[in-house]
C-alpha cells in the first residue's frame, strides 16, 4: 500500500473483531515504531505490549473507561523515558524531546498497522499513574499514548478534515 493510501485509509477504530493479532504483524508494527526518528537517535521512549485481559481492563479504566480498548487483541503503551535524553539535552530533552520521540514512535506504529489492514485508535485521554501501575512501569517513565490494535469490526473510513488552506500559513501565523 502506498504511503498516501495509508494516510487516506487511517481512521480511529473503536470496535475490533475477536481473535489474536498475528505475531508477524505485531513484530512489523514494533519494528516500524523502532525505526521512527528521534532526537539525537537517543530513542528516549519505551514500548509495553499488553495482551493480558485484566491489564487491558485496568488500562481501559485508567483511560476514562474507554471499554472498547479491552476488545482489541493488543494494546501498545508508549512511554517517554526522559532520562535517556537528560545527559545530552538537559531539561529540553527531558521535558520535550522524550515526549516527541514517544509520539513519533506511536505514529509510525499506527501507520504501519493501517498499512497491514489493521485498525487502531490513539488513546491520549488517561490518568498517568494508573496506567503506569497497570504495566508496572518505573515512576520516571511517562505514559504518552496507548494504541489498541486489531482487525476492525466495522469499516467507517476517513472522516472529513479541515481544509489544508486553513491549516497552513505562509511565513508566519495569521493575525
Image (cartoon, rainbow, N blue to C red):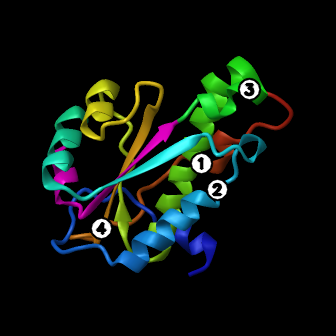
Badge 1 crowding class, 10 Å Cα cut-off, few under 14, some 14 to 19, many 20 or more, is many
Residue depicted at x 23% and y 41%: 59
Q: Is residue 71 magenta?
A: yes
Instruction: Give the x, y percent position of residue 162.
Output: 54, 46
Describe residue 37's horizontal placement relative to residue 152 as left or right.
Answer: right
Viewer-side residue, 100 vs 160: 100
Dots 1, 4 in contact, CB < 8 A:
no
Q: CA–CA distance between discs 1 and 4?
A: 20 Å
Q: Which mark is residue 36?
A: 2
**Numbered tag placed on residue 104 in the rendering:** 1
- How crowded pointer 3 is (Cα within 10 Å; few <14, some 14-19, many 20+) is rated as few
Residue interval drawn in magenta: 66-80
Is the residue 83 above or below the residue 121 in the image? above
Q: Could you say whether the residue bearing mark 1 is in a helix, strand or loop?
A: helix
- Circle nearer the viewer, 3 or 1: 3
Q: Look at the image and tell me whether residue 72 can be seen.
A: yes
Residue 154 rendering spot, x and y as whole percentages: 23, 70
Residue 56 horizontal side relative to residue 89, left or right = left
Residue at (57, 65) in percent of width and height: 32
Number of on-image labels: 4
6 to 80, vertically: above or below: below
Tag on residue 87? 3
Q: Residues within 10 Å of mark 4 (few under 14, many from 20)?
A: many
User: Looking at the image, do the residues carrying marks 2 and 1 touch, with CB atoms under 8 Å apart?
Assistant: yes
Q: Earlier in the sequence, mark 1 or mark 4?
A: 1
Callouts 2 and 4 close, C-beta under 8 Å: no
Amino acid at each position: 500500500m502506498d504511503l498516501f493510501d495509508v494516510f487516506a485509509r487511517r481512521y480511529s477504530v473503536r470496535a475490533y473483531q475477536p481473535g489474536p493479532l498475528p505475531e508477524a504483524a505485531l513484530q512489523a508494527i514494533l519494528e516500524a515504531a523502532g525505526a521512527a526518528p528521534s532526537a539525537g537517535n537517543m530513542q528516549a521512549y519505551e514500548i509495553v505490549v499488553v495482551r493480558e485481559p485484566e491489564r487491558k481492563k485496568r488500562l481501559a479504566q485508567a483511560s476514562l473507561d474507554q471499554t472498547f480498548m479491552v476488545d482489541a487483541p493488543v494494546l501498545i503503551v508508549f512511554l517517554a523515558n526522559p532520562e535517556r535524553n537528560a545527559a545530552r539535552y538537559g531539561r529540553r530533552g527531558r521535558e520535550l524531546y522524550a515526549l516527541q520521540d514517544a509520539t513519533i514512535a506511536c505514529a509510525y506504529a499506527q501507520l504501519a498497522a493501517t498499512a497491514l489492514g489493521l485498525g487502531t485508535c490513539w488513546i491520549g485521554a488517561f490518568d498517568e499513574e494508573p496506567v503506569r501501575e497497570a504495566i508496572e512501569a518505573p515512576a520516571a517513565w511517562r505514559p504518552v499514548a496507548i494504541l489498541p490494535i486489531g482487525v476492525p469490526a466495522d469499516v467507517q473510513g476517513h472522516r472529513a478534515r479541515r481544509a489544508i488552506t486553513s491549516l497552513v500559513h505562509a511565513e508566519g501565523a495569521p493575525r
